[in-house]
Image (cartoon, helix red, strand yellow):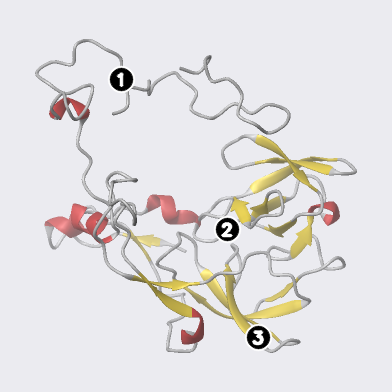
Amino acid sequence: MEVQKNNSTSPGVRHLIKLKKNLLSKNNGICKFNVTKQSKRTGRSSITGHITVRRRGGGTKKLYKSVIKNVKSNAFIILAIMYNSNKSSFISFIFNPFTKILFFTQTVTGHSVGTLIESGRFCNSNFSGNVLQLKNILAGSIINSISYKKRYSVFACSAGAYGQVIQKTDTNCKIRLPSGEIKNFLITGYVTLGIVSNTNFSSIVLGKAGKNRKLGKRPKVRGVAMNPVDHPHGGRTNGGRPSVSPWGKLTKGVKTKKCLDQNGKVASLQNFY
């Protein structure tokens, strides 16, 4: 999908870079059965009302379309490729001719309307979009929508993301994730071949702060601009202390990931803080 930049007819359009959506299908009421209204995200606890996520609130209500990843069926046909307001990638409206069921799934780069996608043990392991188990995929393949420990797809699901199969054994498979980390997965897990659609999503420039507010993102205030009661950096001077979070944790040069032992439990974190 290409990006376009319009002439600067106003200050909000001067730096705007948006996607061309002329190749996407329009939602003409053919898929209302799988759409639910989603309430606004306030970033507060529904019980206490305390702020749980900073800089979140407001925004417009969105229509949520439930997306099924790694569809486990014989074959299905793409009827439409549509924009999804809740995800960075596009979604495909597909039809299973065997079960006569319509549903949404994540779009892979190179797909178009009419593309036939297969799933199962004997399908082509070189065609983007096919869903297979890791034990049936060759080493070096590009994959996405990676599931972990019998859960839903949790890795390589955003726009333009993908992982790569590095090494395979009888029980495990090493995969390089989009972050560069190499992680072990069970070979019985299902993945999708190819790269997630909308690879130019990182090139989008909103152009003005008002669009961020509609997405539910509130302004970010620097710590040095606050009072001492609100942030460790607050007050007349910073005091020469290193950069820390509002809770006093170091933000530069310190690992933030929890250290797990061989049993999967959180180990001692005294070396991290």
Disc 2 marks which amino acid? Answer: Val
Residue in the picture at 34% in, 45% down: 52
Q: Is residue 66 visible?
A: yes
Query: For the residue labelled by badge 2, is the local secondary structure a helix, a strand or a loop?
Result: loop
Residue tagged 1: 243
Q: Position of residue 112 (x, y in %)?
A: 59, 74
Residue in the picture at 17% in, 57% down: 12
Among the 4 quarters of the image, the one containing residue 226: top left
Q: Is residue 241 above or below residue 197?
A: above
Residue extending farthest front: 47
Q: Is residue 126 visible?
A: no
- Left or right: residue 35 versus residue 7 is right
Q: Position of residue 64 (x, y in %)?
A: 43, 71
Q: Earlier in the sequence, mark 1 or mark 3?
A: 3
Disc 3 marks which amino acid? Answer: Ile
Among the 4 quarters of the image, the one containing residue 46: bottom left
Residue in the picture at 57% in, 66% down: 106
Residue tagged 3: 101
Q: Earlier in the sequence, mark 2 or mark 1?
A: 2
Query: For the residue labelled by badge 1, is the local secondary structure a helix, a strand or a loop?
Result: loop
Query: For the residue labelled by badge 3, is the local secondary structure a helix, a strand or a loop?
Result: strand
Residue extending farthest right: 170
Q: Is residue 184 above or below residue 26?
A: above
Residue tagged 2: 196
Q: Residues within 10 Å of mark 2 (few under 14, many from 20)?
A: many
- Left or right: residue 6 versus residue 70 is left
Disc 1 marks which amino acid? Answer: Ser
Q: Position of residue 23 (x, y in %)?
A: 46, 75
Q: Earlier in the sequence, mark 3 or mark 2?
A: 3
- The CA span between labels 3 and 2 is 23 Å
- The CA span between labels 1 and 3 is 54 Å
